[in-house]
Structure formats: C-alpha cells, structure tokens
Image (cartoon, rainbow, N blue to C red):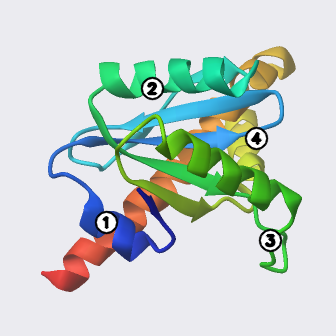
Amino acid sequence: MIHESIEDFAAALPPMAALAGFDLGDKTVGVAVSDRLRSVATPLETVRRKKFTADAEKLVAILTAREVGGVVLGLPRNMDGTEGPRCQATRAFARNFSRLWSGPIGFWDERLSTVAAERALLEADTSRRRRAEVIDHVAASVILQGALDRLRNLSSEGA
C-alpha cells in the first residue's frame, strides 16, 4: 500500500523489519537497506533498468532476500517544492510496484540527495570512475537515512 505521509507509512510498518530505499533514475535504480532496528542506511547496489517487469522482479528478490518490511522511494520534487514529470514517474512506479509487492511504500523528498552523496564520495576521495559506479545507491542511502531519522523522531515524539 502506498502512503503519502511519513506518519501513515510509519503506522503501516511491521515491527523489527528492515527498510529499503530506492533512488529511481531513468537508467538505474539505486538500492539501500537499513538494519532491523532502522538506525543506519547502507548502500547496497545499483540495478540497471531494462523493462519494468524485469526491474520489479529484481527489486522484489532483493526485498525478499533481506526480509524488508517497507520501501521508501525518493520523490524528486523541484527546488520550489512543486512536482514535475519525474515525480509523476516515481508515483507511477510506486503504483505499479505495489501490485507486485504487498509491503508499505512511502515517499521521501529527495531534493539534493545526489548532491549530498556526491559530496560524501568526494570527501572519501573516491575516484571519478568509482563515483559513477556507486552514486545511485549512495544517493538511495541518503534518502533512506533521511526517512529513518524522521521515523526515529516520530517514535520519540509518540513515546
């Protein structure tokens, strides 16, 4: 099921299950996963996009193997907060993916996530070639970590 607000997404999550973050691009999907305590996002891999069915099968296999309980999709809003064609494509992906995977799906504003990922890789003195290989799943971990931090704040507010 797709949840528009992070609060609704949090309420739908099973306890003690890892989360995954997806950074959807035209050619790739960056994938990151959390631990079961939902404290740390770790970059996992970049899936080369082919056709939706093949992409979804690969992503579902990752989610199943890692016993993921929810997915956070980066929502690429414009800098002024409005939604453009890339947001529409992400929402369409979520609708289609929700037909193949039954867990909760939420959105996280991904503005500047790739910039943050690039900066982290530069600070780690990563070569240009290696940055190109890992940028998408590092960006997915930035997206997921933002959502994890917000989920942690929500649970401490409710405690």
Q: Which of the labelled discs sits on residue 118, or is there none?
A: 4
- Indicate which disc, 2 or 3, sits on the residue closer to the N terminus: 2
Percent coordinates x, y for residue 45 in the rendering: 57, 21
- Specify the amino acid type for callout 3: Glu
Percent coordinates x, y for residue 43 in the rendering: 52, 31
Q: Which of the labelled discs sits on residue 83, or is there none?
A: 3
Residue 94 placement, left or right of 68: right
- Specify the amino acid type for callout 1: Ala
Dot in front, 2 or 1? 2
Q: In what element is the residue under mark 4?
A: helix
Q: Are marks 2 and 4 in contact (CB under 8 Å)?
A: no
Task: Give the quadrant of the C terminus.
Answer: bottom left
Percent coordinates x, y for residue 60 in the rendering: 45, 26
Q: In what element is the residue under mark 3?
A: loop
Seen in the picture, residue 106 relative to 31 is either above or below; the reply is: below
Q: Rounded to the nearest whole Å, what is the CA distance between mark 2 and mark 1?
A: 20 Å
Q: Which residue is mark 2?
A: 60
Q: Rounded to the nearest whole Å, what is the CA distance between mark 1 and mark 4?
A: 29 Å
- Indicate which disc, 1 or 4, sits on the residue closer to the N terminus: 1
Residue at 57%, 27% (x, y): give it.
Answer: 56
- Indicate which disc, 2 or 1, sits on the residue closer to the N terminus: 1
Q: In what element is the residue under mark 2?
A: helix
Task: Give the quadrant of the N terminus.
Answer: bottom left
Dot in front, 1 or 4? 1
Q: Which of the labelled discs sits on residue 44, or is there none?
A: none
